[in-house]
Image (cartoon, rainbow, N blue to C red):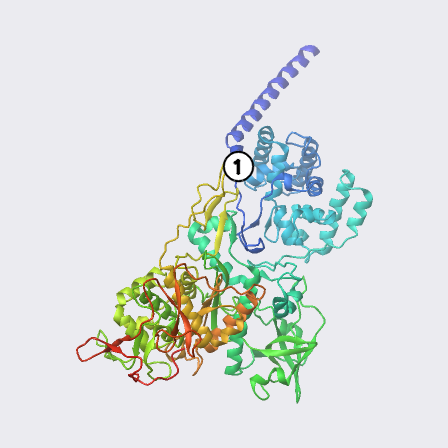
Amino acid sequence: MFLRLVGYIFGIGTVLFLALAGALAWYISDISADVPSYEVLNSYAPPIMTRVHAADGQLVAEYARERRMYLPIQAIPERLKAAFLSAEDKNFYSHSGLDYIGLIRAGIANVESFIAGGGVAGGGSTITQQVAKNFLLTPDQTVERKIQEAILALRIETAFTKDQILELYMNDSNLGMGAYGVAAGALIYFNKSVQELTIAECAYLAALLKGPSNYHPFRFTDRAIERRNWVIDRMVENGYVTPDEGEAAKAEPLGVQPRVERPMVFNAVDFDGAFGPVFEEAYGDTIAALGGIPVRAADYFAEEVRRELLARYGEDQLYGGGLSVRTSLDPNLQIMARKALMDGLVAYDEGAGWRGPLQNIDVTGDWGPVLGEVPMLSDVFEWQLAVVLDVDGNGATIGLQPARDPAGGFVANRVTARIPDDEMDWAGNNPLDVGDVVYVQHVTGDEFRLRQRPEIEGALVAMNPQTGRVLAMVGGFSFSASQFNRATQAQRQPGSSFKPFVYAAALDNGYTPSSVIMDAPIEIEQQGGLGIWRPENYAQQFYGPSTLRIGIEQSRNVMTVRLAQDMGMPLVAEYAERFGVYDNLAPLLAMSLGSGETTVLRMVAGYAVFANGGRSVTPTLIDRIQDRYGNTIFEHDERICPECAPSAWTGQEEPTIVDNRAQVLDPMTAYQITSMMEGVVQRGTATSVRRVGHPIAGKTGTTNDYYDAWFIGYSTDLVVGVYMGFDTPRNLGFGNTGGVLSAPVFTEFMRVALADAPPVEFPVPAGMQLIPINRATGLMASAGADGTILEAFKPGTSPPTNFSIIGFVDAAGQPLVVDPNADRAVGLGQGGLY
């Protein structure tokens, strides 16, 4: 009877067990049906930040929604792997995806939590399970999701190696402060690469896995150190570091030094002795204070690159595609360009007078926190904010804006200094009151100079004329104050800096530099009922018959209009479009004086054609773009070289690179214009540029009512354009021409940029004849005679023995031929539009 009862109970138990097992199998099977495929991990492509580099490799900018860089497992140092394994899954390399002891421990904790009235406590997950959860599942804390996680972990372990799983995990972990993955975490928390991390730093990054906000380095410092030290102890326990190394690491402070959280960052290079004495004399103090050249000076350049990337590839690729962008930026030239333009803008602005302080604050108590909250120009690193504490007969005592501490407050110490009278005399008598908040710039010792943000703005572009590569670009005084790029976005009239394109069209179509034009009053009937236009020269005088060379050198308006009228404006418009200065220039005579709007970048690219012998250039800020896998997807250099990629060297000759750029101007014409614009510098409207000490060709430009001031010039291998004016156009003041405002900025830049290079004359094309002529008449002269210059003539042309005057006819309507010994038709004089 007893045995029968036992058998009966056993039978019932077996049935119940099988039923429960079947139900459990059915339940798991049902859950398994909803488990996503792990195969998507094979094609996993996380969003990776796009990084922009200068031509020398320095990091210029980063663009990302999530700050993330992907590292292969081979590039992650062993001690960093050890920290993550010790913190999260010490048995990772020995289990099959599930840690059963850990699961039992987590199960007991979950039961206790459930009995206590809580939910599922979680825990016990291996790294493989966390990969399954993070990549393939929702973060819900439910029994169903945990089972799916376990199933996926087992499947992942059969399909991927341990190193592949760990690579996914360490590159996707959220480490806080916007950092995803260990590479970004190392940069953001410690401003280091992963290879540079110490044991303590590796342990802190691993400590963040339990919840970055719980172990914030500044809000919860003690808690963060405690968790870090726990990880170090586990590393010692697991044999990754010795006890002595562990104790030394635990004794270290947290040492977090957050990287600047903005697209532009300070990158420094060792400049000592690298750029020559002139560069270091001009910029040494600024660079030494920063520890190197600040690539942050390239904000306008970087933003222009960002806009181009956005237009080419869209937002997803820009902010998550992991593009590697090599730009044409030369950091050395960039800092020179920035300083030259800023100096010119500040000099003009100080000459216009003091406009008053930024604001006035109460300084009776601790003025530091109040002053600390006043926003400043974050990219004008030479300046500081200060508050006036006292004013006396010798100047003013100021308090400098305190620095922020890592926790977001302000350091306790208060630094005071002086503005001597002679460092604020430009602002007038007694310009300051106690409590005034002002900008200051360090001079020497504890002395500072009073500064104010200029109202005038400007731009400078430096370009390689052979390639169109933009080497430096400054689009305004301060990017933090105004992101509007005056180099590429501001459409302004170039004024007389457009005239070389008019003269180039003439020289390319039968005229010579010694062709003579009548500089005399002219009346032009304008279309559209606009009445009669009577163009005038800058000095409001007329100078009679003059050569094309004098027309350029002295920037004669009336001569230029007559020349354009003689050629026909459609020809001038064709050349302007051929040079890329305009897309569709209206064929109106007023346009010959630069009244059509264009940009600094386009003007500089146009002048590059003169400098390189007549070849068209496409301006570019980007040399090459690579995708996340290292494949080149864009390259600016489109020259043809079919022999540049041989499979092997078999003694063949060096490959020939075919220059396939369009020849838009006769090389001889390009040299003639260059020679004439050298005259602008030597004896024309830009004689201040002679201080560069190198052969320079260039042209000034000033628009009506002194609204815009330009200078564009070049050496054999560098073309530079400078523009100055107000964003809302208004008069710059009488006499503030391109030669007065912009040419000195050009000179300051080029003097330093070319200081260590030997002077190089502009090359004369083969076949070009250099013949002595009288500069005033354009007629052949004896070499060495007064007023004689060497003029460039194309084959088949030569200086005349008499000349016809363009724009001056005899009674029969024929061009008047003048005997050089006769009186000039109109008296000579001096002057011209600058």
Residue 21 on image: x %, y %: 59, 23
Viewer-nearest residue: 172 or 524: 524
Q: Which residue is mark 1?
A: 649
Residue ID at (26%, 72%): 565
Label 1: how many residues lie within 10 Å, few (<14), some (14-19) or many (20+)?
few
Q: How many marks?
A: 1
Picture quadrant where residue 18 is located: top right
Residue 254 on image: x %, y %: 73, 54
Q: Is residue 475 left or right of residue 578?
A: right
Q: Is residue 487 left or right of residue 586?
A: right
Residue 808 on image: x %, y %: 25, 78
Q: Is residue 567 left or right of residue 116?
A: left
Q: Farthest residue toward the right?
A: 244
Q: Secondary structure at mark 1?
A: loop
Residue ID at (66%, 66%): 289
Vertical position of residue 742 compared to residue 667: above or below:
below
Q: Which quadrant is the N terminus positioned in?
A: top right
Residue 763 on image: x %, y %: 45, 61
Viewer-nearest residue: 686 or 375: 686
